[in-house]
Image (cartoon, grey):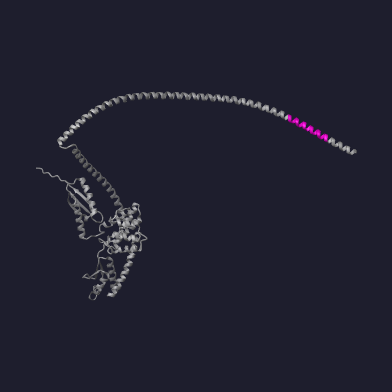
Amino acid sequence: MKGIKLAVIYVILAVITLLVGILVGYLLRKYLAEARITSAEEAAKRILEEAKKEADAKKRETILEAKEEIHLMRTEAERENRDRRNEIQRLERRFLQKEESLDRKLDNMEKKEEHLLKREQDLAQRRTQLDDLLKKRTEELERISGLTTEEARTLILNNVREEVKREAALIIKEEESRAREEADKKAREIVALAIQRGAADIVAETTVSVVHLPNDEMKGRIIGREGRNIRTLETLTGVDLIIDDTPEAVILSGFDPIRREIARIALEKLIVDGRIHPARIEEMVEKAQKEMEQQVREEGEQAAFEVGVPNLHPELIKLLGRLKFRTSYGQNVLKHSLEVAYLAGTMAAELGVDVQLAKRAGLLHDIGKSIDHEIEGPHVTIGADLARRYRENPEVIHCIIAHHGDQEPETIEAVLVQAADAVSAARPGARRETLETYLKRLEKLEEIAESFDGVEKTYAIQAGREIRIIVKPDVIDDMQAAHLSREIGKKIEESLDYPGQIKVIVIRETRHVEYAK
């Protein structure tokens, strides 16, 4: 029991001690909190006082700065106002000066207007007087000349019209001369360069071929018994064999170069073989024909290769090879076509146009001549039809049609092919023509020139490359002479076919003769 009591007492004491501790702690914390609060309040008061002092200082400083700013702004405003007043005063002075100037000008204008009114009145009076004088003068002129006003006006207009025509002709002549000089210079440069770069050999063909014999005894063997060998050879080849007194030679005559070449090859083979009789002749002619076909194809391929024109149709290559055995005015057509291709290509390169097109068209421009003896029609039409048949470029076909002026050239390449064809045909030694054709062309030239009024004499010179016309000086003046040369040139172009160009010269000469007595 005593132990239990002691335990209870200890517990009560512990609880009391705990309560006392709690109370003491609470009071201690309260004291400390109140002390902190008091310290914080004092710090806050101190901070507030310091903040007030700083605020007062800032306020005074701001007030001073504001006063200084206000002073500066007032000073600046006063300065700007002063400048504006000065500017306004300056503008006022200028306005006053302008106003004074305008007043003076207005006064001057009023004076001038009055003066002009007076002058206008004077001019009106003078105009009336002049109209009267002009009317009297016109009446007097009509009376003296015997012409009415309308007739005189017509006469004056006709005179003016003639004068204008003369001046226009003079201007046209000057401009044409200048343009012609520049164009001729450039054209000469291009054509000369083209000729220098691609000059081809001049190959003139004839209508006969000569076959050399090892001896004169061979002539009898070629003739054969009762002439059977020579008849067989002439029948199979279509050429004439001329066996005359020419030593060790036989002449083959024929207008078809291919047949003549076949006959030459066959005859040379027969001479080498030594066996000459009708059956052997037939065999050799057949071999010669096959060799000729091969040679024609090789010549066509070689021509296309030399010019640099690829992808030609095989039939066109064969036709091109046939041109080697075709002549025009004595000029070999294949050589002529190669030369035209070179010239056209070089000129196209100088002008910056399609070189390949120009070469192709130049090479094929006379392709119709390969079969023009087999088909009716001009070689231009035949060539165009062949090109269409073998699906050539339409521009190439156009160049073929236009190269002789049958159609107006529509492309630069067509013009170049036309020019190259003329250059190749016209240069000295390239072609020959018969005496009869030559004389007819000269007569036709002179006849065309003499058909114009005012022409006194005409002379075709320089192998028909130039015609000189002497006109009557009392009928044709200098301006009409220039016009006459153009008209004659146009008529020659329309009436004649000729290679190259023809120079037309009109000569007007006036002579005054007097005798001293």
Q: Quadrant of residue 304?
A: bottom left
Viewport quadrant of the C terminus: top left
User: In this image, 517 relative to 32: left or right?
Assistant: left
Position of residue 96 measured from the top left corner of the image (x, y, whole percent) = 38, 23
In the image: residue 415, left or right of residue 155: right
Task: Give whichever of 165, 481 is nearer the camera.
Answer: 165
Nearer the observer, 237 or 194 = 237
- Looking at the rendering, the stretch of residues picked out in magenta corresponds to 15-34
Residue 213 seen anywhere in this rendered image of the structure: no
At a point 88% along the width and 38% down the height, the residue shown is 4
Assign the N terminus to one quadrant of the image: top right
Q: Residue furthest left?
A: 517
Name above or below for residue 235 compared with residue 140. below
Up/down of 159 relative to 264, above or below: above
Is 19 magenta? The answer is yes
Residue 117, relative to residue 431: is it above or below? above
Q: Number of callouts in the render?
A: 0
Residue 219 drawn at (x, y percent): 24, 73
Q: Residue placed at 32% from the left, 63% from the top? A: 319
